[in-house]
Image (cartoon, helix red, strand yellow):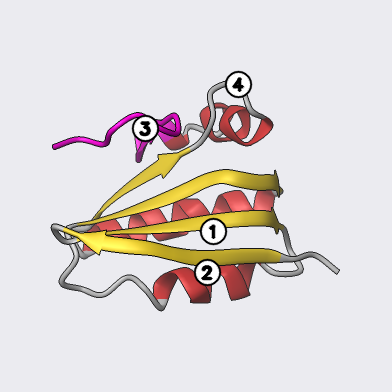
Amino acid sequence: MTTATVTPLGTADGVCTLAVAGEVDLANAAEVEDRILDHTANDLVGVVLDLDGLDYLDSTGLRLLFTLAARLEISQIGLELVVTAGSPVRRALEITGMTRMVSLRPPGEPGPT
């Protein structure tokens, strides 16, 4: 069974930060999306997903991120992904063109101010 966790790391200045860890695939993508959406209120200005603890992301997980980015954009909420440069998850995000929709940054690097 595939497992993933979505852990709230806090909200500051209208930006909610969530850590997604484990594996996201067809078996659990809908549940992961629901957990993320549980924390994305319409009064936010941004959502940061820390994907550094993500070990695996299949095409269903990628679709989840594209759908989430589009949904948040409609609500005028920015999305930023934190993921290690050179990691398999980062490479998948770059190959699929996700960088045209959201910003990516490595862990430890401050977000836009």
Q: Amino acid at mark 4?
A: Gly
Q: Which mark is residue 86?
A: 4
Is the residue under label 3 in contact with that under label 2 (CB below 8 Å)? Answer: no
- Work out whether mark 3 precedes mark 4 in sequence or the reverse, and give the earlier one: 4
Question: From what the image shows, is residue 42 above or below residue 85?
Answer: below
- How many other residues sit within 10 Å of disc 4, few (<14), some (14-19) or many (≥20)? few
- Work out whether mark 2 precedes mark 3 in sequence or the reverse, and give the earlier one: 2
Is the residue under label 1 in contact with that under label 2 (CB below 8 Å)? Answer: yes
Q: Name the residue at 55% across, 34% down.
A: 96
Is the residue under label 1 in contact with that under label 4 (CB below 8 Å)? Answer: no
Q: How far is mark 4 from mark 1, CA to CA?
A: 21 Å
Q: Name the residue at 21% across, 65% down.
A: 75
- Work out whether mark 4 precedes mark 1 in sequence or the reverse, and give the earlier one: 1
Determine which residue is flagged by label 3.
100
| Residue numbers of the magenta segment | 99-113
Q: Is residue 98 magenta?
A: no
Q: Amino acid at mark 3?
A: Arg
Question: From what the image shows, is residue 110 above or below residue 70?
Answer: above
- How many other residues sit within 10 Å of disc 2, few (<14), some (14-19) or many (≥20)? some
Question: From what the image shows, is residue 72 above or below residue 78?
Answer: below
Q: How far is mark 2 from mark 1, CA to CA?
A: 7 Å
Q: How far is mark 3 from mark 4, CA to CA?
A: 18 Å
Determine which residue is flagged by label 2.
33
Q: Which mark is residue 64?
A: 1
Left or right of residue 41: residue 49: right
Please state the horizontal and vertical placement of residue 31, each as a whole percent of the image: 61, 75
Left or right of residue 22: residue 81: left
Q: Nearer the viewer, residue 113 or 43?
A: 113
Q: Is residue 104 magenta?
A: yes
